[in-house]
Amino acid sequence: MAYSTFNRVKNDALKEPMFFGQNVNVARYDQQRHAIFEKLIEKQLSFFWRPEEVDLSTDRKDFMAMAEHERHIFLSNLKYQTLLDSVQGRSPNVAFLPVVSLPELETWLETWSFSETIHSRSYTHIIRNVVDDPSIVFDDIVDNPEIVKRAETVTRYYDAFIEMCSQYSLFGEGTHQLNGEEVVVSLGALKRQLYLTIASVNVLEAVRFYVSFACSFAFAERAIMEGNAKVIKLIARDEALHLAGTQHMLNLMANGQDDPDMVVIASSCKNEVIEIFREAAEQEREWAQYLFKDGSMIGLNAEILSNYVDYITNVRMRGLGLDEIFETRTNPLPWMNAWLVSDNVQVAPQEAEISSYLVGAIDSDMDGADFDDFDL
Amino acid sequence: MGATVTVNEAQSFDYGEEFSLLDSMEEHHIPVTYNCRGGYCGRCKVQLTQGKVNWVQDSLVPLEEGEILVCCCVPDGSISLAT
C-alpha cells in the first residue's frame, strides 16, 4: 500500500490500530484512541529547553586539567551519546511515520524525534566548548571500531524494518523478484519486525543511554564538568519520557488494547526481546572495558559500571513484565538517583521550578458552575 | 480526615495533606525510590494492597492493576502499600 501524505479515505481514527491501519489524514487531537500519547506530547512540550541556556564556561578549564585517560573516558562517552542521538533524531520519523495510523501517535513520534535533535545540538555545544577542533571528535564516531560496532547493533532493527516497509509500500504483500532475488513481503513479518524494532529502541533508551549518563554524572560527582552534567540531566529527563512512550507502545500491543494480531506477535517475540536486552548489556560491559582501558577515575571503574549495566537492565526488564536476567539487585551507583531527580533541573529560572511548567497554559475544562459569579 | 498509610505491614504514618504520597512518605522518613516526581519515570511504583487513592497528576507510565505511583496520588482514606 503506497503512502499518501493525506489519505483521501474518510476514516475513524478511533478504530485504527497504532500502526499498519489506514494512513493518517486529518491531524486532529480533540479525540484520541490512545490518550497517553497526547499527554506525552504535552509533557515533552513543557520540557522544552535549549543547550545554549546552560553555562559551560568552567568545563573547558576542568577538561584541560584532566588526566589523559579521563579525557578519553569523557570524549568517548560523548561520542557514544552523539551516535545514539544521531540515530534517534531521525529514525522514529523515518521508520514509523510511514506506517502510523493515529494522529496523536504520529505527533508524538515527531515530538519525540525533535527532542532528540535538541540533544544532538547539545553535544555540539559541549564539544565546541572543550576542544578546539570539533571535527576530531565527530569524525572519530564513524572511524572508531568500538563506536562503529555499537552503531551496527543500535541501527540493525530500524534498518531492517525500513527496508521491509519500503518493499511493502512499493510492491505490497506477496513474493517478488527484486534485483535478481526472491523477496517475500508479508504484513505478519512486518508487524513482528515492528515489535522487535520498538523493543530495541526501548533498550537503547532504557539501558544504553543510562550507562552513558552514569559516566557523565560521575565527573560531576567530583565537581568537574558540571555544565556537561546539567545538559545531560535535561537529556535524561527527556529520555525518561521517551522510555515511557516505547513502554506504552509495547504494552498496548501485548495487552490486546490495540491491534489484535500484535498480542500473538508480542508473545512469540518474548525470547527475542530478552536476547536484545542481553546483547545490549554485554555490549555495554565491553564498552565499559574500553572506556576504562587506560585507567579508572575516582568513583567509577569498569567493574562498577558493569554492575550498573546489570542493575539497570534488570530494572528495565521488570518494567516490561520480563524476568530479570542478572544477579545484581541493588544499585551500585546510588548517587545516580540524585542526578535523575528532574524537578530541580535548571534552565531559565522562571521555567525551571517545576518540571510540569507549561508555557501559556489555559484551563479549558468549563461547566455551568464556572459562570456562577457572572452578573449581566 | 485521618488517613493512615501502612507500608509493608511494618510502618505506618498519618497522611498530612502533603501534595503527594511521595512527599508524605519523605516527611515521615519512609525509604522510597523516585526520580522524576512527575509521573513519567515509574521509579516510585508501589502496590496498593488496601484502600483507595486520588490522583493529583497523570501517570505517564503503564501501570498494572493495583499499581500506583506515589508521586502522583494521595490517600482517599486509610491505605496499605507494598514497596
Image (spheres, helix red, strand yellow):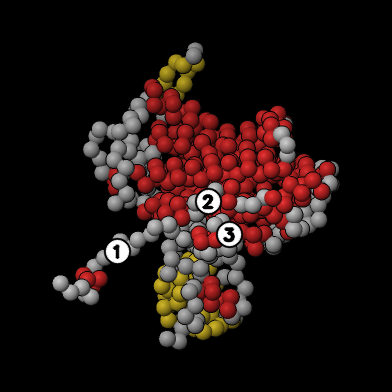
Which of the 4 quarters of the picture holds residue B51? bottom left
- Residue A326's place in the image compared with A142, above or below, is below
Neighbor class of circle 3 (other Cα within 10 Å; few <14, some 14-19, many 20+) is: many
> Which quadrant does the N terminus of chain A fall into?
top left
> Which quadrant does the C terminus of chain A fall into?
bottom left
Amino acid carrying label 2: it is Trp
Residue at image point 69% right, 62% down = A335
Residue located farthest toward the left when viewing the structure as drawn:
A376
Residue under label 2: A49
Residue in front for this viewpoint, A343 or A249: A343
Q: Position of residue B78 (x, y in %)?
A: 46, 82
Residue at image point 35% right, 40% down = A101
- Find residue A345 and name its label: 3
- Residue A331's place in the image compared with A45, above or below, is below
A182 relative to A100 in the view: left or right: right
Amino acid carrying label 1: it is Asp
Residue in front for this viewpoint, A79 or A302: A79
Residue in front for this viewpoint, A326 or A194: A194
Neighbor class of circle 1 (other Cα within 10 Å; few <14, some 14-19, many 20+) is: few
Which of labels 1 and 3 is toward the front? 3
Q: Position of residue A7 (x, y in %)?
A: 29, 33
Amino acid carrying label 3: it is Val
